[in-house]
Structure formats: C-alpha cells, structure tokens
Image (tube, grey):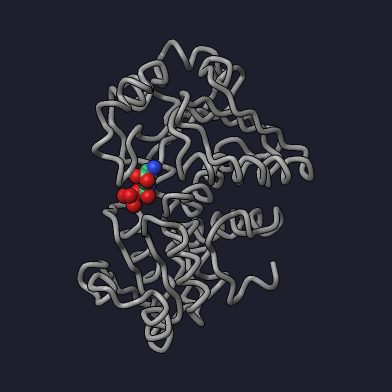
Amino acid sequence: AAGLKGRDFLGLVDYKPEEIRYLIELAVDLKRKQKNGEIYQPLKGKTLGMIFEKSSTRTRISFEVGMYQLGGHALFLSKNDIQMGRGETIRDTAMVMSRYLDGMIIRTFGHRNVVELARSATVPVINALSDLSHPCQALADYQTVFEKKGKLEGLKVAYIGDGNNMLHSLMIGASKLGMHFASASPEGYDPDAEQVRLARQFASETGAKVDILRDAREAVENADVIYTDVWASMGFEEEQKERERAFKNYQVNEALVSHAHSDYLFMHCLPAHRGEEVSEGVIDGRNSVIFDEAENRLHAQKAIMAAIM
Ligand code: CP
Ligand code: NVA
C-alpha cells in the first residue's frame, strides 16, 4: 500500500482494511525471508527509540530484534531513566527525540500520552500498548489466524473476559477485516462504548458483525477463534481479588470451548495466568497457538516499521 511512509501506528482504527491486509501480507513475506536466511535491511542506518512505562517481555524483545534484522538499531528507554520520569513534558521529549531518531514506540498508561507524543514528534510513532489499545498485538494475532485458516473474512472471533485494550484492538481489527466479533464480559467490565460504536460503524462497511454479550457460552458458539486475556491488566493489580470474583464464570476451559468449532484456535496475548482466565488443558492443548502469536509480533512489527519508517 502506497502512502504508509511517515504514518503513525497508534491504532488499527486509523488504517483502512486494505492497509491492514497489506501489513499482514508484508509480515508473512518478511517471515518467509527471515526463515530462508535472506538479508533484508531497508532500515539500515535508522534508529528506533522505545519508551516503556510498563513491563514487557515480547514487545521489547520483538521490536529490538526486529529493528536489528531490518538493518537498524533500537534504544530501550525506560521512562524512569529518562527525564520524562522527572516531569519533562511529552512535547519536549518528542521534539528532542525527533532530532535523533527515525521512529519511536511508546508503552504507557493513558492513551492520550501516545497521541500527544505522536502529535509533537516529527518521526513516526507506534503504540506499543496503552490502556486503550494494543494494535501491534492484534495485527500479529490476525496474521496468525490468516496463516492457520488461510482467510480472515467470515471467521468468528470470540473474546472472553475483561473489556480492555486487547478486546478493543481485536474488535476494531475484526470489524475492519470483515470478521464476526463476539465478546462476553461481566457487568462492570464492558468494553469502551466509543470503541464499540466505531467498530459497529466499520462493520457496517465491511459486512462484519459485533456482538457485545454477557454470556460466555453464547459468545463462543461456533467460534473459529477463542481469545482471552488476564483479568487484571498492568496497573490494575490491586483489584486482583475482586476481579477473581467478578470473572469466575468467564474462564476459558474444556466445557466452554466444546461449543466452538472443533478446529478453533485458542489465542492469548500473554503473559497468562494458567488456572484463572484459561485452564491449563486449553492453553497447553492442541488448539492453542499462543507461541505462534508471540513469534508473529516480530514479523508484524517488522512489517509496520518497514512500511512507515
Ligand atoms: N503481549 C505483550 O505485549 O507482551 P509483553 O507485555 O511481554 O510485551
Ligand atoms: N491487557 C494486558 C495485555 C498485556 C500484553 C495489559 O494491559 O496488561
């Protein structure tokens, strides 16, 4: 897709369906190149800054390795180690960093920080997870579904659990890609109403369907993908106990998955709490593709960087 160069990647919401499909196809191609030992370095001489305000295993490693494989260099910048942690404004940070870097990623709490960094920076900014969304993960996940199922359009994705950043990005992605998205969350943990409104608007243009439900069994009925995430995301750890009570009927286990298609894919962004949001049998069972998803973070983010930087 022409015209991606110089763009930010803050959410799938800003990308057209054909642009998302292009990034997935590019990710598949870069994965093939890497497996064949082909050297492909379009970002030679370029540097990526990576601001992290929260922990990370997959995101940090896959961006750093991805940048290296594309011929560039990545800098890990923990928020506490840069002056932003002592109150230097996001705007000044963005202006200064833009003078050194060719791109930035940020993992932060408030999504407005991502937006503000992008607005002030003169180089492309990538959302590496905010409380609102996690678009890099959703892109890697739909790449994974595409590789396993050979298509995306018409498939049903069931998301069980917290109405969080993962739900939002998967729902927006599904609505753009013509998939049927059904979620089930307990009362008080529904997805953001504005995100649901947007997803329904996209769905009306692509033929996708968005069902926001209470009943987990209804959501997984005939699903091709069952997705879950932790009950207490980063920043919500102190609510762990009350969330365990609220989510007790929302575990993805053998009884629940029996209502999906027998060749359903079990997906989870990781890190997971085995025995809480998912039973050990399901997450370690033969339908689980959790490590393919984790691997595809590398390929999907290489596609994003190669396209926009
Ligand atoms: N799934 C994901 O973003 O993992 P990390 O928090 O380890 O980066
Ligand atoms: N919803 C989780 C995703 C982690 C990758 C969180 O925000 O902690």
Res 280 quadrant in image:
top left
Horizontal side of residue 76 vs 71, given as left or right: left
Task: Residue at the far left: name it.
Answer: 81
Query: In the image, is residue 106 above or below residue 55?
Result: below
Horizontal side of residue 272 vs 298, given as left or right: left
| Residue at (68, 47) in percent of width and height | 176
| Residue at (73, 44) in percent of width and height | 201
Residue 218 point in image, percent of width and height: 58, 16
| Residue at (28, 22) in percent of width and height | 275
Q: How many tags in the picture? A: 0
Query: In the image, is residue 195 above or below residue 90?
Result: above
- The image quadrant where one finds the N terminus is bottom right
Res 276 quadrant in image:
top left
| Residue at (27, 67) in percent of width and height | 79
Horizontal side of residue 116 vs 307, given as left or right: left
Query: In the image, is residue 280 above or below residue 143?
Result: above
Res 284 quadrant in image:
top left
Residue 17 point in image, percent of width and height: 70, 53
Task: Residue at the far bottom: name it.
Answer: 99
Residue 200 point in image, percent of width and height: 70, 40
Viewer-nearest residue: 50 or 286: 50
Residue 254 point in image, percent of width and height: 41, 14
